[in-house]
Image: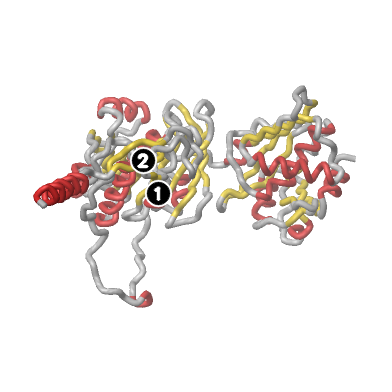
């Protein structure tokens, strides 16, 4: 009996020790997927060796966004008519939906060296005209940032540099300074006492973003969070980070080229898929006021080139799509696409094979959107078809022709949205002919020759006899 009691006490003591031990979880550093044990391959994003161990944080009280109150009928709540704050950078205001909203949290992602800090320093210079702007850096020293600011000409004394990585101290400084905006460079370097894991880990990034968002809403201060992207092109850290913030801006383009494209992938206060195009110089990023003209400045008239009228958000863009079709030297022909979905190109090749556009079975096919843009819109289909057939038959399209239209699996050319906006952009840049879906032809009021197209074989027969 005595031995039984001793055994029971030992078991209870062991259970208390186990209960006090912090729980350990494994999180994917690419997408934030969590598991109770280490996995070699993430089941969500299929990344290899991406799971890292972290201790599960003890639940602690969070800061409230506002004082608690009883539920109120929606028709009794007064709408917030406070004006947006302009960044004095027209393209950035356009992507943000018209300017900064008080308390908004904006996540800015991009490759290292592509221009995130440069753009936000230029925005800070404009915002600091009347009130101070707090620039928090956990990666660079104030001396390094000041050197870049002198090169860019952004040396307003109202830009306050703060080298700190503790979220709690940053929030205390925000409360004391009451700035016009806050810039956190970067979200992977800061940490909060709510989580005991190392800075940059999945848990820290998630908790830091949540605490900073609560502070931004409570203090009505707009906040920029700079985030690095992974080799797959997604913002490092959990995918939940994109759901926490109000707006997500991505830098696109090659950092070794001059043009930079900023795209709004999420925006609670404005339209998504808006784009701003900048050109990188030694003195910083300059806005490209006429993107279509800039993208077509070095356009080729050779076979394989086609001009497409695309629509990014509310902005019409004319882009050049280049195709190269050549005999393959491999057992399986290569299919490569840059700037557009490669699966879409494969679909269009299958339609052309079936509808008399030519045989591509023994041909390598390469398709590229000139200028480094990434465009995902069905209206590009007909232009891609034109570039592919042009290269395959070595017959250039007319130099003054612009194209748009969606292609279906049965070879029909389907209508797209806002055809007159696209047509007006083409007419502004001097194009005189426009190949469009027949269903859109009656909606175009621009002064140019409209060529209605019903089917892919009709398009091929019209321009490649």
Q: Nearer the viewer, residue 58 or 246?
A: 58
| Quadrant where the image shows the C terminus | top right
Residue 9 coordinates in the image, percent (x, y) = 12, 49
Vertical side of 266 occupied by 233: above or below: above
Q: Picture coordinates of residue 261 (x, y %)?
A: 52, 39
The residue at which mark 2 appears reads as 26
The answer to whether residue 77 is above or below residue 59 is below
Residue drawn at (23%, 52%) of the image:
59
Tell whether 423 sits left or right of 162.
right
361, above or below 176, in the image = above
Decide if residue 123 is in sight here.
Answer: no
Question: Residue 138 is drawn in which quadrant?
Answer: top left
Residue 85 percent coordinates (x, y): 36, 52
* Residue furthest out toward the top: 329
Viewer-side label of 1, 2: 2
Q: Secondary structure at mark 1?
A: helix
Residue at which label 1 appears: 240
Rendering quarter of residue 419: bottom right
Instruction: Specify which label sits upstream in the sequence, 1 or 2.
Output: 2
Residue furthest left as drawn: 2
Determine if residue 301 is in view: yes
For the residues labelled 1 and 2, the Cα–Cα distance comes to: 16 Å
Q: Where's residue 372, x and y in %?
A: 58, 34
Q: Name the residue at 48% across, 32% down.
A: 231
**Depth check: 210 or 148 in front?**
210
Q: How many marks?
A: 2
Q: Secondary structure at mark 2?
A: strand
């Amino acid at each position: 009996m005595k031995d039984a009691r001793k055994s029971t006490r030992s078991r209870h003591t062991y259970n208390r020790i186990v209960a006090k031990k912090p729980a350990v979880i494994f999180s994917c550093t690419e997408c934030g997927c969590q598991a109770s044990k280490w996995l070699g391959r993430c089941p969500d994003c299929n990344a290899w060796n991406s799971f890292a161990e972290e201790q599960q944080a003890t639940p602690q009280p969070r800061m409230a966004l506002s004082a608690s109150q009883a539920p109120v009928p929606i028709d009794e709540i007064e709408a917030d008519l406070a004006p947006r704050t302009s960044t004095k950078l027209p393209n950035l205001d356009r992507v943000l939906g018209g300017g900064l909203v008080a308390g908004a949290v904006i996540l800015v992602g991009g490759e290292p060296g592509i221009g995130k800090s440069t753009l936000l320093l230029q925005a800070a210079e404009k915002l600091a005209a009347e009130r101070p702007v707090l620039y928090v850096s956990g990666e660079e020293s104030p001396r390094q940032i000041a050197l870049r600011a002198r090169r860019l000409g952004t040396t307003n004394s109202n830009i306050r540099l703060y080298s700190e990585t503790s979220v709690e101290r940053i929030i205390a400084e925000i409360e004391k300074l009451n700035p016009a905006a806050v810039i956190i460079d970067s979200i992977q370097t800061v940490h909060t006492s709510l989580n005991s894991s190392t800075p940059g880990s999945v848990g820290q990034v998630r908790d830091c973003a949540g605490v900073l968002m609560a502070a931004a809403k409570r203090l009505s201060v707009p906040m920029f969070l700079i985030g690095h992207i992974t080799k797959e092109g997604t913002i490092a850290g959990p995918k939940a980070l994109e759901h926490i913030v109000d707006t997500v801006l991505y830098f696109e383009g090659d950092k070794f080229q001059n043009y930079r494209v900023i795209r709004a992938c999420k925006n609670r206060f404005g339209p998504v898929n808006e784009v701003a195009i900048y050109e990188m110089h030694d003195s910083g990023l300059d806005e490209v006021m006429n993107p279509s003209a800039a993208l077509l400045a070095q356009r080729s008239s050779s076979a394989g080139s086609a001009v497409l009228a695309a629509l990014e958000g509310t902005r019409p863009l004319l882009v050049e799509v280049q195709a190269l079709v050549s005999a393959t030297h491999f057992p399986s022909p290569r299919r490569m696409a840059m700037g557009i979905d490669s699966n879409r190109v494969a679909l269009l090749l299958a339609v052309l094979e079936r509808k008399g556009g030519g045989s591509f079975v023994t041909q390598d096919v390469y398709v590229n959107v000139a200028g480094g843009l990434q465009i995902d819109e069905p209206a590009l289909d007909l232009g891609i078809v034109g570039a592919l057939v042009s290269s395959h038959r070595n017959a250039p399209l007319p130099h003054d022709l612009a194209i748009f239209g969606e292609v279906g699996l049965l070879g029909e050319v389907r209508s797209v949205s806002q055809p007159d906006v696209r047509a007006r952009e083409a007419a502004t840049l001097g194009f005189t002919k426009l190949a469009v879906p027949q269903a859109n032809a009656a909606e175009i009021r621009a002064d140019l020759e409209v060529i209605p197209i019903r089917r892919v074989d009709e398009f091929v027969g019209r321009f490649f006899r």
